Each structure stands twice: as structure tokens, then as C-alpha cells.
Amino acid sequence: MRSLKILTVVGARPQFVKAAALSPVLARQDGVAEVIVHTGQHFDANMSDIFFSEMAIPEPRHNLGIGGGTHGQNTGRMIEALEAVLLAEVPDAVVVYGDTDSTLAAAVATSKLAVPLAHIEAGLRSFRRTMPEEINRVVTDHLADVLYAPSVSAVANLKREGIPQDRIVNCGDVMHDVVRLFTTIAMQRSAALDRLGLLPGEYNLMTLHRKENTDDRARLESILDGIAASPRPIVFPVHPRTTKRLAEFGLKLPRIVRTIEPQGYLDTLRLEASAHQILTDSGGVQKEAYFHGVPCVTLRDETEWVELVESGANMVVGADSARIAACLTGSALMNAKPNIYGDGRAAERIVDDLLKRLRP
Ligand code: UDP
């Protein structure tokens, strides 16, 4: 049997979480070696290192140390550095996740060298080209040789854009795998509630980091006005970009908000699972809310995870302070269908399919 080298490119927090589903499945395969490359897009200990240690993701062999610049600077530097890594490593395939600048750079460098490219979490669309992530997804999907889509709607988006059917696999969502693998461990090991003096069901959890919210003072202010109506404390792990913008705009958080540092994955799962409601503009956190059965209020004008809205698990309210306040003061019941995004075994399906393609 031919041995295979799979090179995985990660760089940002949501990609470390997704790699935690796939890396252990790759490690179990005979004759398969995974080489992880970290672009350095997220570099703080609490945005990067903690995920590798807590979730037992193999150490990156290459750390490119590229972060902190503009989209163009980061992407350009990453393409150049990744090309050198690919020429040195000569992998049989490259795996990329999601929609960050690291995803885009890896897709460009890989496809120019004619190395097979697999895109995990393919086919998601906000249909809003002003969103940097949307550009990254569209380009990556059109460069990829195999596209692992998490939902029926993602498959439909890809087909509508003319991507051949035989390249698309509806495998379910790897984030469901991760929640399945780590929730029990989080409930046993995380001391987040005790540390913060919180009781289950008696607080809301918020995350907020999308550029469309953080970089637009009026939207950010309107969100802060809306959340001030919360009858429960809002626990808010603040993303570095949001900390920076709040300071630049001189905005004060409502008294009901309790800020904390970005959390590791186990503490985040614990805080999510026991929250009364979750408010977020994160893609991953919207789904985690659903997996835990916690109602979600999405602080965006649209979502890529349309099934969550259709099933009643998610209310998309934008930055409208009145709608946000109404969600926080109204009833928070949820009765969504189970397993919208597969059965929590997406990584096995992906690895199985990828190896069949590489070893026909
Ligand atoms: N997350 C975390 N600590 C935090 C906030 C989020 O571990 O303080 C996790 C969260 O559980 C989810 C992932 O980070 O798995 C989502 O990443 P993010 O919101 O940065 O990106 P997006 O999903 O919007 O691309």
C-alpha cells in the first residue's frame, strides 16, 4: 500500500477546533502521515497554543509566524511561505478548513503546484461579497479538487456555481464531531462556572468578533444598546480585535456584561452548554449552541447556517438593538430537529473518501 503524506494548513482558532476532529482519524490510518503547518494568523497563547495542548492536536512542523498585517499582506506572505513548504514537503494532498486568509493562501499555493486540494466546510455562503470570509470561501471552493460540504444547502450552493458533482461530498460537519468528542470531558474537567461564580441557566454567553460588527462603530454601539436589556449577566470572552476596536471607539460595555479573556475550548464548551442563551456573530458558536440545545441569537444580518434558522434554533437579528433586546427578554425555547449537520462522524467519512481518491 502506497504511503501518503497529508499536509494540513491551519492558522486561526476555528481551524484548530476543526483539526481536532480530523487529526486523530488521520493518525489511526496505516501508511498515512499528517504534517501540520500553522501560518501564525492567530498567535496569542489563548487563541492558539491552548487548543493544541487541550485537544491533543499534533504540534505543527512548520510555523510561518505570519499575522498582524492587512488581508493582502498576510495572504501574500502566506502564499510565498506555503509554496516553499510545499516544495520541501512534497505532500500527496493538502487539507484546508473554512474561510480564513490562511485557507485562501493555502488554496492558491497548493493549486498552482498541482497538488490535490481538499476543502473542509465547503459550500457555505453568506452571499455578501463585502465579507472577507466570503471571498476566501468562494475562491477556495473553485480551486479545490474535493469539497467536503457540511449540509444539503452547502452542496446546493456548490452545484449552483457549476462545481462538478463528483468533487462534492456531503459528509456532515466536523464541528459536530468535536462537540461529541469533547463535551463530556469539558463537563468533567472545566471549572469555568465555579471560577466565574456562575450557575447553569442563569447567564447568557456572548462572542463578537466579525469585522462587519467590530469595525463599524454604529453597529457595535447598537449591539451594546440591545444587550443592555439582558435580565441575566452576559459573559463575554473578548476577541483581541474587539478589545482593540472598543478602545479605539471609546465605547463602554453595559454593566450587565462581564468580560473575560478568550477561553480555551473546554471552558468554552462548558460555558456554552450551561448558558440560558448564546449571542454571537461566530459561525462555529452558532452551531455549538445548537449541538448543546441552547437557543442562539445571531448578531449578523444573515447566516451561512440557514438550517438553524429554519429549524427554530437560531434567531438572526443583525445589530438591531430593539430586536436583540426582545430576544433577551422574551422566552428562550427551542425545539430543533436533531442531527441537522450529520451524526458527529464527519471526519471518518472525509478521511475514508480522501484516501480512496488518493489510492484508487
Ligand atoms: N471559542 C473558544 N474560545 C472563545 C471563543 C470561541 O474556544 O473564547 C471557540 C468556539 O467554541 C468555536 C470556535 O472558537 O469552536 C469559533 O471560532 P471563531 O468564533 O473565532 O470563528 P468562526 O467560527 O466565526 O469562524
Image (tube, grey):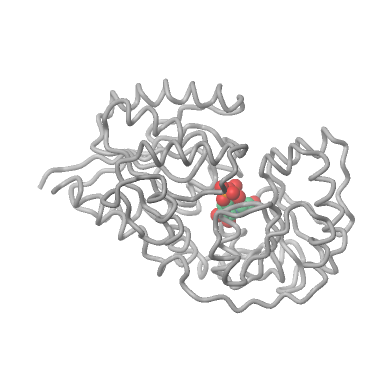
Asked whether the viewer can see residue 264, the reply is no
Q: Nearer the viewer, residue 61 or 330?
A: 330
Residue at the (67%, 62%) spot, across then down: 192
Look at 75% across and 35% down and name the residue there.
Answer: 244
Q: Position of residue 173 (x, y in %)?
A: 44, 59
Q: How many marks?
A: 0
Vertical order, 92 against 68 (above or below)? below
Observer-nearest of 284 and 327: 327
- In the rendered structure, the answer to whether residue 166 lies left or right of residue 297 reads left
Measuring 61% from the left and 27% from the top, which residue is drawn there?
68
Q: Is residue 129 visible?
A: yes
> Residue 353 at x, y = what percent?
25, 54
Whether 323 is drawn above or below 355: the answer is below
Q: Quadrant of residue 291?
A: bottom right
From what the image shows, is residue 235 above or below residue 251?
Answer: below
Q: Residue 60: where, in percent of width, then height?
A: 41, 37
Q: Residue furthest left?
A: 1
Picture residue at 55% right of the left edge, 23% below the top: 72
Return the residue nearer the eye: 340 or 12: 340
Where is residue 209 drawn, in percent x and y? 68, 45
